[in-house]
Amino acid sequence: MKLYTFTAGYSLVIGRLMRKDQPLKFIRMPMVCFLLERSDGLILVDTGLGTTTVRNPAEFPGIFYTMVLSFRIREGEEAISRVKSLGYHATDVKHIILTHLHMDHVGGLSDFPDAEVHITRQGYATMNGQADKFMSFFHSGAFKHSPKWQIHELNEKPFLGFPQSLDLFGDGNVVIVGTPGHTAGHIGVAITLKNETFLHLGDAALFNDQFLNPSIVAIGTKIFRWKANSTPMKESDSQKQLAAACENVMGLHTICSHDTWTLERWPKFPEPLAIG
Ligand SMILES: [Zn+2]
């Protein structure tokens, strides 16, 4: 098995507005995906933006998110291009696991119409009545192809210190954990190869240091969290659990979807992040 990580799109932001230790200049905040190569097929965690955005950003994510929030993707960066560059086809991606349904995590979904798409029941329900509302971050255009949803309930089984989890394939390789707060039903995805675990945290935090060293969080991050979070009280619970997991779990590596600083320290695609 091989695990890869790559970015499928980015947004342009001023670094200092996100973290107090960053310079006053524009940086690219990535949209991070995981790609797991198993003998029974490929598994993708989040999709970032996809070919629809490369072709026509006005269609997805739309003018506002393109111009104001600077959601961008360059041709060749889409998850489908990454998959093809490894010699695979779209149909080799058997499963897509979504941390949540915000548009910057699902924009490439329609590039894999045959994949089973995994989400929690609460995560699925968060979009009800919110799709396409101004600044809701939910865009119905990502789901026009009628994805093959697999809706899950989490078990009351602690994993990595998180109270709820689900071993998705029953072999301990891919375990989803409940990290509610950014959205209800938001999940992290833990992939274990040998004795190392890589935890994709979606938007449970904006960057790892947010829960390890909260004093460096700057105003832009606070505004973003306030605007985008649906249940902020639960977010602080999730972040306490994340901080405890980082301190107590040996061989645990965590990354948040938009954490350019952690991504910089990890192997660059197509070099694998881990081999198991
Ligand atoms: Zn996001």
Image (spheres, grey):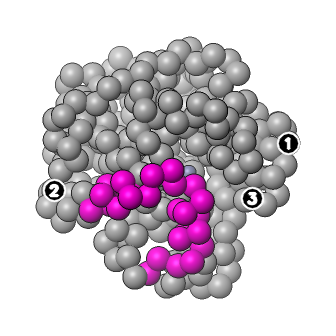
Q: How many marks?
A: 3
What secondary structure is the stretch in magenta mostly built from? Answer: helix
| Classed neighbour count for the residue bearing mark 2: other residues with Cα under 10 Å, few (<14), some (14–19), many (≥20) | few
Q: Give coordinates of residue 138: x percent, y percent.
A: 64, 40
* Residue at the disc numbered 3: 70
Give the CA distance from mark 2 to mark 1.
44 Å
Q: Spatial distance from mark 1 to mark 3, Cα to Cα?
A: 12 Å
Which mark, residue 249?
A: 2
In the foreground, 82 or 252: 252
Q: Which mark is residue 58?
A: 1
The residue under the point 41% across, 38% down is 185
Q: Residue at x 65, y 85 (%)?
A: 24
Q: Quadrant of residue 27?
A: bottom right
Q: Residue at x 40, y 30 (%)?
A: 120
Q: Compared to 36, does 71 lie above or below?
A: below
Instruction: Work out whether residue 65 or residue 231 is closer to the camera in this orientation and state it.
Output: 231
Res. 160 mark: none
Asked whether residue 228 is drawn in magenta, I would say yes
What residue range appears in magenta? 216-240
Question: How far apart in space, not on screen, are marks 3 and 2 (Cα)?
Answer: 36 Å
Residue type at the position of mark 2: Val
Q: Is residue 82 left or right of residue 72?
A: left
Position in image of residue 71 (x %, y %):
71, 53
Task: Say if residue 48 shows up in the picture.
Answer: no
Q: Which of marks 2 and 3 precedes in the sequence?
A: 3
In the picture shown, does residue 143 fall above or below 104?
above
